[in-house]
Amino acid sequence: MPDETTPLPVLEADDKKTTVGNYFVSNYPPYSMWSTDHRDAALNLFDTPAALGTPLGLYVHIPFCRKRCHFCYFRVYTDKTRDEVSEYLDAVLEEATRYAATARIEGRKLKYVYFGGGTPSYLSEKQLTHLFDGLKERLDWNEVEEVAFECEPGTLSTRKLACLKDLGVTRLSLGIENFNDDILELNNRAHRSQQVGNAYDWAIDAGFEQVNIDLIAGMLGETDENWQANIDTLVKMQPHAVTIYQMEVPYNTTIYKDMKESGKDEAPVADWGTKRRWVTEAYAALEDNGYDITSAYTAVRDAAEIKFVYRDALWSGADMLALGVSSFGYLTADNGGGMHYQNQHDIVPYISAVTGGDQPMYRALPIDQEEAMIREWVLQLKLGKINRQPFIKKFGVDPFEKWADILGGYAEEKLITIDGDEITIPRQTLLRIDTLLVAFFKPEHHGVRYA
Ligand SMILES: C[S@@+](CC[C@H](N)C(=O)[O-])C[C@H]1O[C@@H](n2cnc3c(N)ncnc32)[C@H](O)[C@@H]1O
Ligand code: SF4
C-alpha cells in the first residue's frame, strides 16, 4: 500500500523518461485526504448494519518479506523473528474477533478473501493454519467465492502449497516479476529463476483454480531482448492469468533514495513510452495464444471461466473489512456514499493498539454519493469497457452528462470511443489509463498529494 507523500502526475509529462511519483490510481479520494479526525466516525459505522445484499470481503495484510526489493513501496519488514510474526498474527485474530461482534459484520457471509503484502507466503504452514483457522472461527467463510493469496516464489514448497490448497486458497498469485537472474538480483528480489520454475510447476500440480503471474515491465536492467525472452517464457507457461505492471518509482523506494544521494532526477528505469510498448508486445503475444485482455493490467486464458472477484467487488463498492498493518477497508453508508479507513501503518502502534484493547484504525474518510460514484467510475474505466446504465441506476446520475466535457474531449482525441450507452477504451489508452482518471476527480482533489 502506498504510504508516501507523492503528487499524482495529472498527465504524463514526458514519454521519454520515468519521473518519480505514484502513477497507479488504486482508490479515490486520494489517501492524503484520509484523516485521523474521521477515525471515530468510521468505528461508529461498524455499529450500523449494511444495506441488505451488500457483498462483504476481507483483506488481510501480511507485512513480512525475505528481502526488500529496490522498487517496492509497500509497508514491509525483513527483520522480524518467528515470535514477532506470531505475535502479529494473534493481533490480527484479535482485531477480527472485535469486528466480528459488530452490527456491521455479525452474521454476514464473506464473498471473497484476499491475503496481500508484503508476502503472505512468507508464513510457515503452522502459522498459515493458525491464521486461516482463526479467521474461519470468527468470520463466516461458508459462501466464499474466492480466496486470493500473494506469494513470492522462493518461499514456496510442495508442502506449503498443499497446505494452502487445503486451507481453501483458490487464486494463487506468484510475484515472479522477471525470469532473468541478473535482473532479479539487480532489483534485490529474494528469488531466482530456478525457484520460479519450481514454484509454478508445484502450484499447477497442486490444482489451484487459478494461478496468476505478476510481471513488471521496466525493472532495473530490463532490455528489449530480455523482455522478449520474458514474453516467450510466459507464453510457454500458459498460466490462467497474467498481471503486468509498469514500473513506477514512488518516493519511498530504494531506487529513489539512491537517485537522491547521487543527485539524479531521472529514474534509472525505462521511460513510459518503452514500458507501454513492452506491455503492448506482451499482450499481443498473449492474445495470439488465446488470452483475453480483461483490464489495463490483466490477461486471462479463459475470460468466461477466470474471474477476479476481489477486484470486481472492490471496484463496484462492496464492503471490505481490513485487518493488519496499513491495510485499508471500505464500508457503505445509507446516504449512497461510504467510509474509507486504513489501519496504523507501523507494526508497533498496530500491536499496542490491539493489546491495549483498542482497534488499530489510524485514519478514515467519509465520502458522499458523488465521491462514491467517481470512485467506481475511475476504477471501472480500467476494465476497458464501461456502460452508463448501472451508474444511472445506482447513483441517479448520468455519467455521460456529468462528464460530457471530459468525455467529449477524450473522444475527440480518440482516447476513447463512445457508442450508445458504452465507452470502449482502446489498448493504447488503457496502457496509460491512470493518467486520464484524475480529470474525473472533484476540483478539490486535483493537484493534492496522492498518498
Ligand atoms: C505485494 S506484491 C506481491 C507479493 C510479493 N510481495 C512479491 O512481490 O512477490 C504486489 C505486486 O506489486 C507489484 N509492484 C511492487 N512494486 C512495484 C512498482 N514500484 N512498480 C510497479 N509494480 C510494483 C509487483 O508486481 C508485485 O508482485
Ligand atoms: S517481495 Fe513484494 S512486498 Fe516484499 S519487498 Fe518485494 S515487491 Fe515488496
Image (cartoon, rainbow, N blue to C red):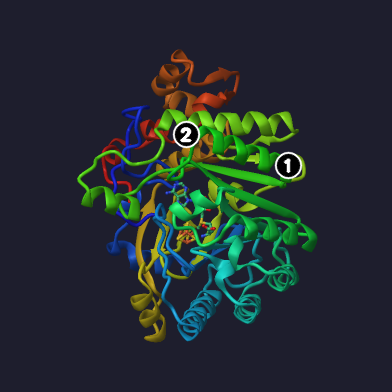
Q: In the figure, is residue 110 to the left or right of 345?
A: right
Q: Which residue is mark 1?
A: 236
In percent of width and height, residue 22 lies at 36, 44
Q: Earlier in the sequence, mark 1 or mark 2?
A: 1
- What residue occupies the far front of the structure in this picture? 182
Residue closer to the observer: 279 or 128: 279
Tell me the SS state at disc 2. helix
In percent of width and height, residue 131 lies at 60, 77
In percent of width and height, residue 29 lies at 37, 46
Q: Which residue is mark 2?
A: 275
Q: Residue at position x 47%, y 17% from top?
A: 411
Q: Residue at position x 43%, y 28% from top?
A: 273
Q: Residue at position x 34%, y 32% from top?
A: 17
- What residue occupies the far top of the structure in this picture? 412
Q: Residues within 10 Å of mark 2 (few under 14, many from 20)?
A: many
Tell me the SS state at disc 1. helix
> Which amino acid lies under the numbered mark 1 shown in the image of this protein?
Lys
> Which amino acid lies under the numbered mark 2 shown in the image of this protein?
Lys
Q: In the figure, is residue 206 to the left or right of 82?
A: right
